[in-house]
Image (spheres, grey):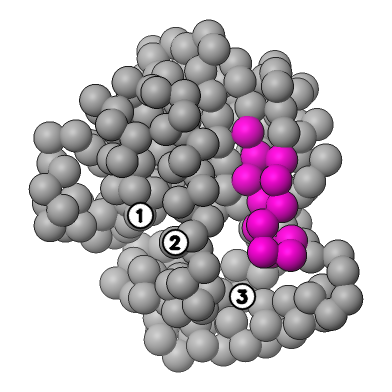
Amino acid sequence: MFDDISPSYDFLNHTLSFGIDKLWRKKVVKLVKATHPDTILDIATGTADLAIALAKTNARQITGVDISEGMLKIGREKIYANGFQNKIVLEQGNSEFLRFADNSFDAATVSFGVRNFENINKGLNETYRVLKPGGTLTILEFSHPESFPMKQLYHIYFTIICPALGRIVSKNPRAYSYLHESVAAFPSGQDFINLLTETGFNNTSWKVLTLGISTIYSAIK
């Protein structure tokens, strides 16, 4: 599915979010930069939007991993266009079976990808394993607005408008229906913090963005 929609993925994401997703990523970059990481692992990197933005952290090496080669192809083109080929490396891989040694990275990030883990617990355990002691995890993910009228507007937009536009542009009848379904099934807020704690992470916190549409989760190994 992700291979199929990769050519239109960036356009749809930026358009359907009205560009707000770029502002959300900037907040992630600011948090990561404050920890001065030398090496960063961007899991479920997709077309490398966050990996490219993380170049501003001045990290020496950024590694992006994604299961979709179609997404990675677009990401590599963007990396070369921005001149980051010596700083950012993309490779195909499964977030639940990372090839890296224990204690390899100073920081790990996931942008709109945790909800796509087939097994969230296994994905989080793998992330924990490859982080160095004291390493940071920063996750940006969709969540569920609870207040009127955002809750109602969000529901209409994500269940009706988003899938319809996604089908027209991406030509994939499933992709943007899956978006809503995956967000609805994701254990957001305190429930996700509990998963991070159970994995072994400390200093967990979460910050709601744009009236609850998305959330940034932070934790330390």
What residue is shown at x 29% (from left), y 48% (from top)? 52
Coordinates of residue 79 in the picture (x, y in percent)? 19, 50
Q: Would you name the residue on which mark 2 appears?
A: 22
Q: Would you name the residue on which mark 3 appears?
A: 177
Amino acid carrying label 2: it is Lys
Coordinates of residue 8 in the picture (x, y in percent)? 34, 75
The span shown in magenta is 206-218
Q: CB of mark 1 within 8 Å of CB of mark 2?
A: yes
Position of residue 108 relative to residue 192, above or below, is above
Q: Would you name the residue on which mark 1 appears?
A: 49
Tell me which numbered mark, 3 or 2, is placed earlier along the sequence. 2
User: In this orientation, which residue lies closer to the viewer: 167 or 221?
Assistant: 221
Position of residue 119 relative to residue 175, above or below, is above
Please tell me whether mark 1 sits on a helix, a strand or a loop: helix
Between the residue at mark 1 and the residue at mark 3, the CA separation in whole angstroms equals 22 Å
Tell me which numbered mark, 1 or 3, is placed earlier along the sequence. 1
What residue is shown at x 39% (from left), y 49% (from top)? 50
Left or right: residue 165 versus residue 67 is right
